[in-house]
Amino acid sequence: MIESLSDFLWYWDAIAGLQPIVGGDPTFTRASSGLIVPDRSHRIRSISADFPRFPWVTIDGERVRVLLLEMARTSVALDSEDLTTGNWSSTGTPIVTGDDSIAPDGTVTADKVEDDDGAARESRNQGTITVADDSNPHAVAVFIRKQTGGPGGRIRVDLSGGTPITATLPFDPDALTVDDSDGDVDLAGIEDMGDWFAVFLVVSNDSSGNTSLDVRLEPVETAASTGFQHFWGLGIEVGAFPTSYKGVSAGSSVTRAVENCSWNGAPDPQAMVIYLDMVLVDPLATGNSRRFLQIGKSDDSDSRIFIHNQAANKIRLSYDPGTETTADITLTTPAVGERVQIVASLEADGSGRLVVSHAGADPTGSDFAAAAEGMATAWSDNVLWLNSIGTASVSAEKYRQVKIVKAANLDAAVDGTDDDELLIEMENLAVNQFGQVR
């Protein structure tokens, strides 16, 4: 039974920042400034370089703080917060009013686009953006303001040479529909941000020769009436999923640098149980092999515990005292934005078990056999990493908690007979700000 801090080998919760209650000193780097999307009140806030970002997400109906870690990404959208400039063009004759509403960052910088005739579609366009390789997916995201009793907004994304690919946001967000006549929409979604929706599309095109991207922002109108909508913060980036908004872009692209987070002083090799609670940002893709958590040396050399995405929809636990032993779990298509809980146990003989649950489903478990070398005597370095090491195996995740406890102190068994009880016990272990177990 976990009764005191001495039963913990590690306890970190994003609610308290980067410093664990039990654990070593943190190191965080990001060479560029970043934006928190969103905070507890759904507000976007800017933050300086080399400071971590702690947005809030909704888990089981509760707003909770998480640590956001992302790879480097560049948005090629121009004048992302000003639809009145020459970097935007029009289809039809929409009326564009600059700085007409309060934007998601609290400034009066959101622009209104109004359809003036109630007939043919009219839009404000960020057009003819050159793409280096049309076989790569492109993620397009924008903020669309909610309206009371009025029409919604629409993103339309065109790869030149193909049929328009359109996502429509009607007034009812539950009725979000995707018009995918070419079959090129890889991912689409909507996030409720209080007064705004964050809407995104990821598109790809298998045909050759398409080297430009046309993004159109349209108010939804009917034949009988005109319509208007407020837009803000367009982002266009190469990638299989959208990352967080990178900030205002003027006449050039804007880049957010890679984020690295680690702690010195990870526990020595011993029988232990590791619990990781996170929210997916990056889909579990084929061959991604991205890092969720690692204990060991910063150059990936032996010995280490490594929890990572091994293949499409697959999570792997690797233990390497000299010869790697692994446990794999294949999930049923976890979606972006879903909560994933991982329990990894390591026994004194080098055997182990991986238990995973996502979106609140019953946990799935998998074992690996004892290592020929037995338990390692050291990790090479006692460093605990989340996400990337430098620029290797980089992904994007939202981390909530990391807990590591001595296996002997748990009530639930770690032999595969009580996966659900083990997961519940690890989830419910809590330490308050005074270092008291509760």
Image (cartoon, rainbow, N blue to C red):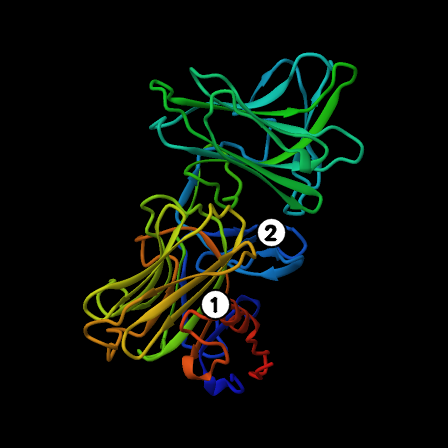
Q: Quadrant of residue 273?
A: bottom left
Residue closer to the observer: 75 or 335: 335
User: Mark 1 or 2, which is nearer the eye?
Assistant: 1
Residue at image mark 2: 38
Q: Residue at x 52, y 67 (%)?
A: 420
Q: Secondary structure at mark 1?
A: helix
Q: Is residue 75 left or right of residue 109?
A: left
Q: Residue at x 41, y 43 (%)?
A: 73
Placement of 20 over or under 318, stated as above or below: below
Placement of 279 over or under 86, stated as above or below: below
Q: Secondary structure at mark 2?
A: loop
Image location (x, y in percent) of residue 389: 32, 59
Mark 1 surroundings: few (<14), some (14-19) or many (≥20) residues within 10 A: many
Placement of 250 over or under 424, stated as above or below: above
Q: Residue at x 65, y 16 (%)?
A: 121
Mark 1 → mark 2, Cα distance in angstroms: 34 Å
**Quadrant in which the C terminus is drawn:** bottom right
Residue at image mark 1: 419
Q: Is residue 51 visible?
A: no
Placement of 9 over or under 85, stated as above or below: below
Tell me the kind of residue under disc 2.
Answer: Pro
Tell me the kind of residue under disc 1.
Answer: Asp
Residue closer to the observer: 368 or 18: 368
Q: Is residue 350 left or right of residue 190?
A: left
Q: Is residue 347 left or right of residue 115?
A: left
Image location (x, y in percent) of residue 373: 19, 74
Image location (x, y in percent) of residue 50: 44, 59
